[in-house]
Image (cartoon, grey):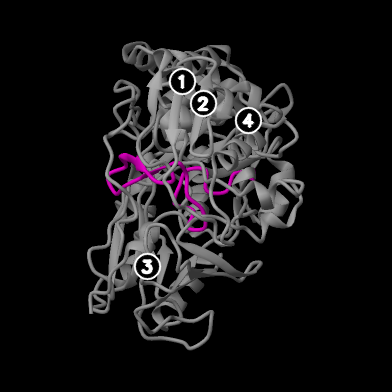
Amino acid sequence: MTTRRIKGVAVAATMAAAVAACSAPSGGTDGAAGGGSADSVVIGVPNEPDTLSPLLGYGKDGNSKIFDGLLARDADLELEPALAKALPEVADDGRTYTYTLRPGVKFSDGEPLTAEDVVYTYETVLDDRTNNTAKSELDAVKEVKADGDDKVVFTLKYPYAAFPARTVLPIVPEHVAGEQDPNTGAFNTEPIGTGPYVLTGWSKGEKLTFKANPDYWGGAPKVKKLTMAIIADDDVRATRLRSGDLDGATLPPNLAATFKDDDGRKTYQATTYDFRAVTLPTGNKITGDTTIRRALDLAVDRKAMVDKILDGAGRPAYGPLPLDDPWYAKDIERPQDLAEAKKILDGDGWKAGKDGIRAKDGARAAFTLFYPSGDKVRQDHALAYASDAKKAGIDVKVEGATWEVIEPRMGKDAVLAGFGSTGDPDFGLYTLLHSSLAGDGFNNMPHYDNPAVDKALETGRRAQDPDDRKAAYDDLQRALVKDPGYTFLTHIDHLYVLDDRWGDLTTQVEPHEHGFASGPWWNAEDWQPEK
């Protein structure tokens, strides 16, 4: 079997990528049940993508199964060649990147990959008419051109040190996708790529099934059938795993712990950039009040959340970057301080009523906090947050709802949200905080607008000197302490339980997105049977 990826030299990347797990035990007999064989795997995940088109954002951070990017990440998150046969040639002081394509690569419909497919993919993502909310991530790109059939040249508006990590973006076939509207075309649910797997079916809300691509340029996978079972409820997912209906699953810490003594299964724990936070919309009179925000930041007991909700599988979050990240500002840790929270509320005229809840100018310090139904970890975070807030005199009403209910209300109501990206601080922070992206889908959900933060984000994106970038991101993190648009709670570890049928499985450091792109199945195409 040909090695899928050729090891490359590490390119600037200081954060991290993805992770998870799965395998195949004895179990059911149909497409929604456990595989029961070495060549079939059924994985339980909590959600499904909205689209399978990279033109709309699917797989933009790599590991998409159906597609490949010019580059990929290995287990250690180093960038390495994928559709490109080598790492890019860099010229013009970091403004020009040239990629040479790997020869002989074909899409799963048999058509050859060409440089024009790469150009089409990037130009379509960047087109204002394409509904891709991640296009700001490619802001540095000025032009993409083909140089013959096998070379692609990117010209940047400004030197962007993190650019190579952006080229894990999956490449789509122009001869198929180019004949459709990228926003509404059939390609969104019937994709064709160069990847190790081919989609064979998608029952919305139930499962996605994939078969191995026998002509994959990296060699035909040993796992011939891969099924992603969509099971939103954590308890149901654990029950189906225990019954043998699933081969592996993503689970919260309390449920993963119940498999600890199961000799037939193995638990994988991956550290992450995935954080839980409460969005504080500026359009809400209460959550938009800076004093309320600061008081909530001081009232929350992050350590208790890690210990009690995550059973130690995580870390307190004092901002969007985890404590052990090299870009983390080391002086921003802050323990729970209810006395200080009450003091700043008193000082700004938020006075406690007979019921203990504060009010100012006729407005009661109360708001609704939504969490997605079925997500026990977010529910527990939301309830703990509300309990801590009440001790400071702020009434938080916790409600579970579907995303269909939550999304239209994100601009006015608080949400227990999850974010976190890997690869470079620019990748996660710009879309989280920049005012130009306020209300753009899940980007900048609270409509946060802080000129000092915007300036730091722009400096961090464009500066070439690492010290200048570090200073900018330090400034940003300190500004968030003074004017928090979110209450950052915890960075959570991802836990996966799977049948112990395959050997030498690995995980990566993960972003928020996990399930499809992460876990031990991040490289299922490379799995080898252990027995």
Crowd tier of the residue under label 4, counting other residues whose Cα lies within 10 Å: few below 14, some 14–19, many 20 or above: many
Classify mark 1: helix, strand or loop.
Answer: strand
Tag 3–tag 4 contact (CB < 8 Å): no
Do we see residue 253 in this rendering?
A: no
Of the residues under marks 3 and 1, which one precedes in the sequence?
A: 3
Q: Which residue is mark 4?
A: 287
Q: Is residue 181 visible?
A: yes
Start-end of magenta stretch: 56-83
x and y percent of residue 21 in the render? 36, 63
Which mark is on residue 10? none
What residue do we see at 31% from left, 47% from top? 74
Where is residue 236 drawn, in percent x and y?
A: 51, 73
Q: Type of residue at label 4?
A: Thr
Residue flagged by tag 3: what amino acid is it?
Cys
Question: Which numbered disc flags the more N-terminal residue, 4 or 1?
Answer: 1
> CB under 8 Å between callouts 4 and 1?
no
Of residues 429 and 409, the one nearer the viewer is 429
Q: Determine which residue is flagged by label 3.
A: 22
**Where 223 falls versus 143 (above or below)?**
below
Return the residue at label 2. 154
